[in-house]
Amino acid sequence: MNTKLKAISLKIIYPRWEKLKGQTTFNLPPHGPVVFAATLPEQVSVSFTDENVDTIDFDEPCDLVAISMMLSTQVKRGWAIATEYRKRGIKVMFGGISTMLHAEETLQYADSIFLGESEGRMEQVLLDWQNGCLKKVYNYMGQFPPIESVGPARRDLYKRDLYNHKGVQMVDLFHASRGCRFSCYPCAVAYLGGRQFRPRPMWRVEEELRTIENNRLFVVDNSLAQNKEWELKLFETMIPFKKKWISHTIDDDPEVLRMAAKAGAWYVYQAVYDTSPYIKERIKRYHDNGIGVEGTILLGLDNQTEDDCRRLIDFLLEIDLDLAEFTVMTPFPHTKGYDDLLRQNRIFDFDWDHYNAGQVVFYPKHMSPDKLQELYDYAWKTFYHDESQEAKMTRLFTRVMMREMEDGTYRPRDRRLIGKSFGKDVVRTTLTQ
Protein backbone atom coordinates (compact mmCIF):
# COMPACT_ATOMS: atom_id res chain seq x y z
CA MET A 1 0.00 0.00 0.00
CA ASN A 2 1.38 3.38 -1.05
CA THR A 3 1.89 5.65 1.95
CA LYS A 4 3.03 8.68 -0.04
CA LEU A 5 0.42 10.92 -1.59
CA LYS A 6 0.80 11.51 -5.32
CA ALA A 7 -0.39 14.52 -7.30
CA ILE A 8 -4.20 14.74 -7.38
CA SER A 9 -6.55 17.06 -9.25
CA LEU A 10 -9.61 17.81 -7.12
CA LYS A 11 -12.68 19.71 -8.23
CA ILE A 12 -14.71 21.39 -5.46
CA ILE A 13 -18.33 22.24 -6.30
CA TYR A 14 -20.78 24.42 -4.36
CA PRO A 15 -24.30 23.61 -5.66
CA ARG A 16 -26.81 26.28 -6.60
CA TRP A 17 -30.08 26.84 -4.80
CA GLU A 18 -33.24 28.76 -5.55
CA LYS A 19 -33.33 32.21 -4.00
CA LEU A 20 -36.43 33.46 -2.21
CA LYS A 21 -38.85 35.32 -4.44
CA GLY A 22 -39.28 39.04 -3.90
CA GLN A 23 -36.02 39.57 -2.03
CA THR A 24 -32.91 41.33 -3.27
CA THR A 25 -30.73 38.63 -4.82
CA PHE A 26 -26.97 38.75 -4.53
CA ASN A 27 -24.29 36.11 -4.08
CA LEU A 28 -21.56 36.16 -1.46
CA PRO A 29 -18.40 34.12 -1.98
CA PRO A 30 -19.00 30.87 -0.07
CA HIS A 31 -16.83 30.26 2.97
CA GLY A 32 -16.95 26.51 3.58
CA PRO A 33 -15.37 25.37 0.28
CA VAL A 34 -12.34 27.67 0.57
CA VAL A 35 -11.83 26.81 4.25
CA PHE A 36 -11.90 23.14 3.23
CA ALA A 37 -9.47 23.80 0.35
CA ALA A 38 -6.98 25.25 2.84
CA THR A 39 -6.84 21.90 4.64
CA LEU A 40 -5.73 19.97 1.55
CA PRO A 41 -2.15 18.70 1.19
CA GLU A 42 0.17 20.54 -1.19
CA GLN A 43 0.07 17.63 -3.68
CA VAL A 44 -3.56 18.51 -4.47
CA SER A 45 -4.34 20.92 -7.30
CA VAL A 46 -7.76 22.46 -6.85
CA SER A 47 -10.38 23.96 -9.13
CA PHE A 48 -13.57 25.45 -7.73
CA THR A 49 -17.02 26.10 -9.16
CA ASP A 50 -19.72 28.00 -7.31
CA GLU A 51 -22.78 27.02 -9.32
CA ASN A 52 -24.67 30.08 -8.05
CA VAL A 53 -22.48 32.33 -10.21
CA ASP A 54 -20.88 29.95 -12.69
CA THR A 55 -21.59 26.82 -14.76
CA ILE A 56 -20.19 23.38 -14.00
CA ASP A 57 -17.98 21.99 -16.75
CA PHE A 58 -18.60 18.27 -16.33
CA ASP A 59 -15.96 17.58 -19.00
CA GLU A 60 -13.16 19.34 -17.11
CA PRO A 61 -10.59 16.61 -16.28
CA CYS A 62 -10.28 15.78 -12.58
CA ASP A 63 -9.35 12.80 -10.43
CA LEU A 64 -11.90 13.36 -7.69
CA VAL A 65 -14.91 15.60 -6.97
CA ALA A 66 -15.75 17.13 -3.59
CA ILE A 67 -19.22 18.65 -3.18
CA SER A 68 -19.52 21.19 -0.37
CA MET A 69 -23.06 21.91 0.84
CA MET A 70 -24.11 24.50 3.40
CA LEU A 71 -27.90 24.72 3.03
CA SER A 72 -30.66 22.13 3.06
CA THR A 73 -31.90 23.69 -0.17
CA GLN A 74 -28.65 22.62 -1.86
CA VAL A 75 -28.76 18.93 -1.08
CA LYS A 76 -30.99 17.68 -3.89
CA ARG A 77 -28.96 19.61 -6.45
CA GLY A 78 -25.77 18.25 -4.87
CA TRP A 79 -27.09 14.71 -5.22
CA ALA A 80 -27.89 15.32 -8.90
CA ILE A 81 -24.38 16.65 -9.56
CA ALA A 82 -22.86 13.62 -7.87
CA THR A 83 -25.00 11.27 -9.94
CA GLU A 84 -23.70 12.84 -13.16
CA TYR A 85 -20.05 12.54 -12.15
CA ARG A 86 -20.44 8.97 -10.94
CA LYS A 87 -21.98 8.02 -14.30
CA ARG A 88 -18.70 9.25 -15.78
CA GLY A 89 -16.69 7.01 -13.46
CA ILE A 90 -15.43 9.78 -11.15
CA LYS A 91 -15.70 9.26 -7.41
CA VAL A 92 -17.52 11.89 -5.39
CA MET A 93 -17.08 12.97 -1.78
CA PHE A 94 -19.50 15.17 0.15
CA GLY A 95 -18.81 17.51 3.07
CA GLY A 96 -20.10 20.66 4.70
CA ILE A 97 -22.91 21.60 7.05
CA SER A 98 -25.78 20.09 5.06
CA THR A 99 -23.89 16.87 4.48
CA MET A 100 -23.76 16.55 8.26
CA LEU A 101 -27.47 17.35 8.60
CA HIS A 102 -28.53 15.01 5.78
CA ALA A 103 -25.84 12.34 6.06
CA GLU A 104 -27.98 9.20 5.70
CA GLU A 105 -29.68 10.40 2.52
CA THR A 106 -26.48 11.79 1.05
CA LEU A 107 -24.77 8.41 1.48
CA GLN A 108 -27.02 7.06 -1.29
CA TYR A 109 -25.41 9.43 -3.80
CA ALA A 110 -21.81 9.45 -2.55
CA ASP A 111 -18.70 7.35 -2.76
CA SER A 112 -17.75 8.89 0.58
CA ILE A 113 -19.02 11.49 3.02
CA PHE A 114 -16.88 13.49 5.43
CA LEU A 115 -18.53 14.58 8.67
CA GLY A 116 -16.86 17.15 10.92
CA GLU A 117 -13.94 19.55 10.56
CA SER A 118 -11.24 18.63 8.06
CA GLU A 119 -8.05 20.27 9.40
CA GLY A 120 -5.26 17.68 9.64
CA ARG A 121 -7.39 14.86 8.26
CA MET A 122 -7.52 15.11 4.48
CA GLU A 123 -4.15 13.56 3.67
CA GLN A 124 -5.28 10.22 5.09
CA VAL A 125 -8.62 10.44 3.29
CA LEU A 126 -6.86 11.09 -0.02
CA LEU A 127 -4.36 8.30 0.61
CA ASP A 128 -7.30 5.95 1.13
CA TRP A 129 -8.74 7.07 -2.21
CA GLN A 130 -5.35 6.68 -3.89
CA ASN A 131 -4.97 3.16 -2.49
CA GLY A 132 -8.49 2.12 -3.52
CA CYS A 133 -9.83 1.83 0.01
CA LEU A 134 -11.85 5.03 0.36
CA LYS A 135 -14.20 4.67 3.31
CA LYS A 136 -17.91 5.27 2.87
CA VAL A 137 -18.00 7.50 5.96
CA TYR A 138 -15.34 9.56 7.73
CA ASN A 139 -17.02 10.62 10.94
CA TYR A 140 -15.21 13.19 13.07
CA MET A 141 -18.31 14.76 14.59
CA GLY A 142 -17.45 16.10 18.04
CA GLN A 143 -13.73 15.41 17.49
CA PHE A 144 -12.51 18.93 16.92
CA PRO A 145 -9.00 19.62 15.61
CA PRO A 146 -6.81 22.10 17.52
CA ILE A 147 -8.26 25.53 16.77
CA GLU A 148 -4.78 26.92 16.12
CA SER A 149 -4.56 24.57 13.12
CA VAL A 150 -7.21 26.61 11.28
CA GLY A 151 -5.26 28.67 8.76
CA PRO A 152 -6.27 31.25 6.13
CA ALA A 153 -8.94 30.22 3.65
CA ARG A 154 -8.05 29.72 -0.04
CA ARG A 155 -9.73 32.89 -1.36
CA ASP A 156 -7.50 32.71 -4.44
CA LEU A 157 -9.99 30.13 -5.76
CA TYR A 158 -12.76 32.72 -6.15
CA LYS A 159 -13.61 34.21 -9.52
CA ARG A 160 -13.70 37.60 -7.88
CA ASP A 161 -15.59 39.53 -10.56
CA LEU A 162 -18.61 37.26 -10.12
CA TYR A 163 -19.22 38.44 -6.55
CA ASN A 164 -20.67 41.89 -6.91
CA HIS A 165 -24.17 43.24 -6.97
CA LYS A 166 -24.88 45.62 -9.84
CA GLY A 167 -21.24 46.65 -9.88
CA VAL A 168 -20.79 46.92 -6.11
CA GLN A 169 -18.26 44.68 -4.37
CA MET A 170 -19.89 42.40 -1.80
CA VAL A 171 -18.31 41.21 1.44
CA ASP A 172 -15.81 38.39 2.00
CA LEU A 173 -16.57 35.89 4.75
CA PHE A 174 -14.22 35.37 7.70
CA HIS A 175 -14.43 33.57 11.04
CA ALA A 176 -12.57 34.19 14.28
CA SER A 177 -14.03 31.31 16.29
CA ARG A 178 -15.90 28.04 16.08
CA GLY A 179 -18.51 26.46 18.31
CA CYS A 180 -21.14 28.25 20.35
CA ARG A 181 -21.93 28.06 24.05
CA PHE A 182 -25.58 28.90 23.36
CA SER A 183 -28.14 26.41 22.14
CA CYS A 184 -30.92 28.37 20.47
CA TYR A 185 -34.12 26.48 19.73
CA PRO A 186 -34.11 26.49 15.91
CA CYS A 187 -30.31 26.27 15.52
CA ALA A 188 -28.13 23.25 14.61
CA VAL A 189 -24.80 24.75 15.72
CA ALA A 190 -24.67 22.74 18.94
CA TYR A 191 -24.84 19.57 16.85
CA LEU A 192 -22.41 20.76 14.17
CA GLY A 193 -19.74 22.67 16.07
CA GLY A 194 -20.32 21.78 19.69
CA ARG A 195 -21.35 23.80 22.74
CA GLN A 196 -17.79 24.82 23.55
CA PHE A 197 -16.65 28.24 22.36
CA ARG A 198 -13.38 27.78 20.45
CA PRO A 199 -11.69 31.09 19.63
CA ARG A 200 -8.84 31.20 17.13
CA PRO A 201 -5.56 32.62 18.48
CA MET A 202 -5.14 36.28 17.62
CA TRP A 203 -2.00 35.53 15.60
CA ARG A 204 -4.18 33.37 13.37
CA VAL A 205 -6.79 36.13 13.11
CA GLU A 206 -4.10 38.62 12.09
CA GLU A 207 -2.58 36.14 9.64
CA GLU A 208 -5.89 35.66 7.86
CA LEU A 209 -6.85 39.34 7.83
CA ARG A 210 -3.55 40.09 6.10
CA THR A 211 -4.54 37.74 3.27
CA ILE A 212 -7.93 39.38 2.62
CA GLU A 213 -7.77 42.13 0.01
CA ASN A 214 -11.45 43.00 0.25
CA ASN A 215 -12.05 45.85 2.69
CA ARG A 216 -15.59 44.57 3.45
CA LEU A 217 -16.12 41.52 5.62
CA PHE A 218 -18.87 39.41 7.08
CA VAL A 219 -17.61 37.94 10.37
CA VAL A 220 -19.66 34.75 10.27
CA ASP A 221 -19.08 33.52 13.85
CA ASN A 222 -22.35 32.24 15.33
CA SER A 223 -22.16 34.96 17.96
CA LEU A 224 -19.43 37.38 18.97
CA ALA A 225 -21.13 37.80 22.35
CA GLN A 226 -19.49 34.73 23.90
CA ASN A 227 -16.69 36.19 26.00
CA LYS A 228 -16.30 39.92 26.60
CA GLU A 229 -12.54 39.83 27.15
CA TRP A 230 -12.02 37.90 23.92
CA GLU A 231 -14.45 40.15 22.06
CA LEU A 232 -12.51 43.27 23.07
CA LYS A 233 -9.22 41.63 22.11
CA LEU A 234 -10.65 40.66 18.71
CA PHE A 235 -11.76 44.22 18.00
CA GLU A 236 -8.39 45.58 19.14
CA THR A 237 -6.68 43.16 16.75
CA MET A 238 -8.93 44.23 13.87
CA ILE A 239 -8.44 48.00 14.27
CA PRO A 240 -5.17 48.34 12.29
CA PHE A 241 -6.66 46.55 9.28
CA LYS A 242 -9.37 49.20 8.84
CA LYS A 243 -11.89 46.63 7.59
CA LYS A 244 -15.58 47.45 7.49
CA TRP A 245 -17.51 44.47 8.74
CA ILE A 246 -20.88 42.88 9.42
CA SER A 247 -21.48 40.32 12.16
CA HIS A 248 -24.08 38.58 14.22
CA THR A 249 -24.91 39.92 17.66
CA ILE A 250 -22.23 41.55 19.80
CA ASP A 251 -22.42 42.25 23.52
CA ASP A 252 -24.75 45.03 24.65
CA ASP A 253 -21.99 46.74 26.61
CA PRO A 254 -20.77 50.35 26.23
CA GLU A 255 -17.09 49.39 26.07
CA VAL A 256 -17.72 46.60 23.55
CA LEU A 257 -19.86 48.86 21.34
CA ARG A 258 -17.21 51.60 21.32
CA MET A 259 -14.47 49.14 20.44
CA ALA A 260 -16.60 47.49 17.76
CA ALA A 261 -17.19 50.87 16.13
CA LYS A 262 -13.49 51.70 16.32
CA ALA A 263 -12.69 48.32 14.73
CA GLY A 264 -14.95 49.05 11.77
CA ALA A 265 -18.36 47.59 12.67
CA TRP A 266 -20.60 48.48 9.75
CA TYR A 267 -23.82 46.81 10.81
CA VAL A 268 -24.93 43.84 12.89
CA TYR A 269 -27.68 41.25 12.76
CA GLN A 270 -29.82 41.62 15.85
CA ALA A 271 -32.63 39.24 16.73
CA VAL A 272 -35.89 41.07 17.41
CA TYR A 273 -37.90 38.58 19.42
CA ASP A 274 -40.38 40.78 21.30
CA THR A 275 -41.73 44.35 21.52
CA SER A 276 -39.98 45.30 24.76
CA PRO A 277 -38.41 48.72 25.40
CA TYR A 278 -35.08 46.88 25.77
CA ILE A 279 -35.03 45.97 22.09
CA LYS A 280 -35.78 49.56 21.09
CA GLU A 281 -33.04 50.88 23.38
CA ARG A 282 -30.57 48.30 22.16
CA ILE A 283 -31.08 49.38 18.55
CA LYS A 284 -30.54 52.98 19.66
CA ARG A 285 -27.26 52.09 21.40
CA TYR A 286 -25.96 50.50 18.21
CA HIS A 287 -26.91 53.60 16.24
CA ASP A 288 -25.39 55.93 18.84
CA ASN A 289 -22.08 54.21 18.11
CA GLY A 290 -22.48 54.53 14.34
CA ILE A 291 -23.37 50.85 13.86
CA GLY A 292 -26.27 49.93 11.59
CA VAL A 293 -28.75 47.18 12.47
CA GLU A 294 -30.45 44.50 10.41
CA GLY A 295 -33.21 42.99 12.48
CA THR A 296 -33.69 39.23 12.20
CA ILE A 297 -37.27 38.20 12.89
CA LEU A 298 -38.43 34.60 13.28
CA LEU A 299 -42.15 33.93 12.79
CA GLY A 300 -44.10 30.80 13.70
CA LEU A 301 -42.74 29.82 17.10
CA ASP A 302 -45.15 28.01 19.40
CA ASN A 303 -45.42 31.02 21.71
CA GLN A 304 -46.60 33.29 18.88
CA THR A 305 -50.22 33.85 17.93
CA GLU A 306 -51.28 35.66 14.78
CA ASP A 307 -51.80 38.83 16.85
CA ASP A 308 -48.33 38.47 18.36
CA CYS A 309 -46.78 38.29 14.90
CA ARG A 310 -48.68 41.33 13.68
CA ARG A 311 -47.71 43.35 16.76
CA LEU A 312 -44.08 42.38 16.23
CA ILE A 313 -44.19 43.42 12.58
CA ASP A 314 -45.78 46.77 13.49
CA PHE A 315 -43.17 47.27 16.21
CA LEU A 316 -40.37 47.08 13.65
CA LEU A 317 -41.56 50.29 12.06
CA GLU A 318 -41.02 52.08 15.39
CA ILE A 319 -37.44 51.07 16.17
CA ASP A 320 -35.46 52.56 13.28
CA LEU A 321 -34.00 49.39 11.79
CA ASP A 322 -31.75 49.83 8.77
CA LEU A 323 -32.86 46.50 7.30
CA ALA A 324 -35.01 43.57 8.36
CA GLU A 325 -34.87 39.91 7.40
CA PHE A 326 -37.90 37.71 8.04
CA THR A 327 -37.86 33.94 8.29
CA VAL A 328 -40.42 31.33 9.22
CA MET A 329 -39.59 28.70 11.80
CA THR A 330 -37.96 25.85 9.85
CA PRO A 331 -37.31 22.45 11.48
CA PHE A 332 -33.85 21.65 10.16
CA PRO A 333 -32.66 18.12 11.02
CA HIS A 334 -30.63 17.71 14.22
CA THR A 335 -32.28 20.67 15.93
CA LYS A 336 -34.58 20.57 18.92
CA GLY A 337 -37.25 22.14 16.74
CA TYR A 338 -37.08 19.23 14.31
CA ASP A 339 -37.13 16.64 17.09
CA ASP A 340 -40.12 18.25 18.80
CA LEU A 341 -42.20 18.75 15.66
CA LEU A 342 -41.38 15.31 14.30
CA ARG A 343 -42.42 13.69 17.58
CA GLN A 344 -45.66 15.68 17.51
CA ASN A 345 -46.30 14.67 13.89
CA ARG A 346 -46.43 18.33 12.84
CA ILE A 347 -44.03 18.28 9.87
CA PHE A 348 -45.94 17.75 6.63
CA ASP A 349 -43.28 18.58 4.01
CA PHE A 350 -39.90 16.81 3.77
CA ASP A 351 -38.88 18.25 0.40
CA TRP A 352 -35.53 19.82 1.29
CA ASP A 353 -35.83 22.34 -1.55
CA HIS A 354 -38.59 23.93 0.55
CA TYR A 355 -36.39 24.29 3.65
CA ASN A 356 -35.33 27.82 2.76
CA ALA A 357 -36.71 29.59 5.86
CA GLY A 358 -39.30 31.26 3.68
CA GLN A 359 -41.73 28.39 3.13
CA VAL A 360 -43.90 26.84 5.83
CA VAL A 361 -43.31 23.07 6.13
CA PHE A 362 -45.01 22.34 9.47
CA TYR A 363 -48.26 22.91 11.35
CA PRO A 364 -47.93 25.97 13.61
CA LYS A 365 -49.48 25.77 17.05
CA HIS A 366 -51.78 28.80 16.91
CA MET A 367 -52.60 29.21 13.21
CA SER A 368 -52.78 27.33 9.94
CA PRO A 369 -49.71 26.89 7.68
CA ASP A 370 -51.42 29.13 5.10
CA LYS A 371 -51.91 31.87 7.70
CA LEU A 372 -48.24 31.75 8.75
CA GLN A 373 -47.21 31.93 5.09
CA GLU A 374 -49.50 34.92 4.68
CA LEU A 375 -47.95 36.63 7.71
CA TYR A 376 -44.45 36.01 6.35
CA ASP A 377 -45.37 37.66 3.04
CA TYR A 378 -47.15 40.47 4.90
CA ALA A 379 -44.04 41.14 7.00
CA TRP A 380 -41.79 41.69 3.97
CA LYS A 381 -44.35 43.86 2.19
CA THR A 382 -45.12 45.95 5.27
CA PHE A 383 -41.56 46.68 6.34
CA TYR A 384 -40.40 47.61 2.83
CA HIS A 385 -43.59 49.35 1.75
CA ASP A 386 -42.25 52.92 1.95
CA GLU A 387 -38.65 52.19 0.99
CA SER A 388 -37.51 49.11 -0.90
CA GLN A 389 -34.94 46.65 0.35
CA GLU A 390 -32.53 47.74 -2.39
CA ALA A 391 -32.95 51.39 -1.42
CA LYS A 392 -32.16 50.58 2.20
CA MET A 393 -29.13 48.53 1.08
CA THR A 394 -28.01 51.49 -1.01
CA ARG A 395 -28.08 53.66 2.10
CA LEU A 396 -25.86 51.20 4.00
CA PHE A 397 -23.38 50.85 1.15
CA THR A 398 -23.25 54.61 0.69
CA ARG A 399 -22.43 54.94 4.38
CA VAL A 400 -19.63 52.38 4.24
CA MET A 401 -18.08 53.96 1.16
CA MET A 402 -18.11 57.35 2.88
CA ARG A 403 -16.26 55.82 5.84
CA GLU A 404 -13.78 54.17 3.49
CA MET A 405 -13.10 57.49 1.82
CA GLU A 406 -12.63 59.21 5.17
CA ASP A 407 -10.03 56.71 6.40
CA GLY A 408 -8.28 56.28 3.04
CA THR A 409 -9.28 52.66 2.41
CA TYR A 410 -11.78 53.21 -0.39
CA ARG A 411 -10.79 51.66 -3.72
CA PRO A 412 -12.59 52.72 -6.91
CA ARG A 413 -13.77 49.17 -7.60
CA ASP A 414 -17.50 49.89 -7.35
CA ARG A 415 -18.92 50.60 -10.78
CA ARG A 416 -22.06 52.53 -11.77
CA LEU A 417 -21.49 55.09 -9.04
CA ILE A 418 -22.98 58.53 -9.10
CA GLY A 419 -23.54 61.68 -7.24
CA LYS A 420 -22.63 64.30 -4.73
CA SER A 421 -24.50 64.76 -1.51
CA PHE A 422 -24.19 66.21 1.99
CA GLY A 423 -22.12 69.08 0.56
CA LYS A 424 -19.07 66.98 -0.31
CA ASP A 425 -17.99 64.33 -2.79
CA VAL A 426 -19.48 61.02 -1.82
CA VAL A 427 -19.93 57.79 -3.70
CA ARG A 428 -23.47 56.54 -3.97
CA THR A 429 -24.32 53.17 -5.45
CA THR A 430 -27.06 52.97 -8.01
CA LEU A 431 -28.42 49.68 -6.75
CA THR A 432 -31.94 50.74 -7.70
CA GLN A 433 -31.15 51.35 -11.37
Image (cartoon, grey):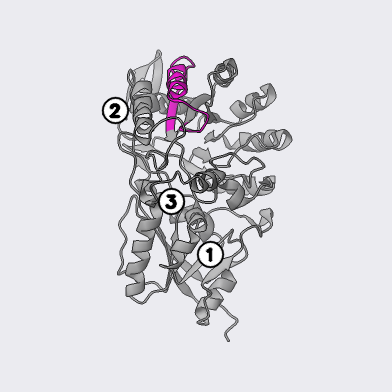
Q: Position of residue 149 (x, y in %)?
A: 65, 57
* Residue 309 within the segment the image draws in magenta: yes
Which residue in the structure is indicated by mark 3?
72
Eyeballing the image, is 430 above or below 234? above
The mark lying in front, picked from 3 and 2, is 3
Which residue in the structure is indicated by mark 1?
114
Query: In the shown orientation, is residue 18 left or right of residue 194?
Result: left
Q: Is residue 394 visible?
A: no
Kindly indicate the quadrant of the structure image that contains residue 328: top left
- Sort mark 2 into few (<14), some (14-19) or many (20+) by Cα contacts within 10 Å: few
Residue lying farthest left?
Answer: 433
Which residue in the structure is indicated by mark 2?
432
Label 2, secondary structure: give it: loop
Label 1, secondary structure: give it: strand
Along the line of sight, the residue nearer the viewer: 183 or 115: 183
The quarter of the rendered structure image containing the C terminus is: top left
Q: What amino acid is labelled 1 in the image?
A: Phe
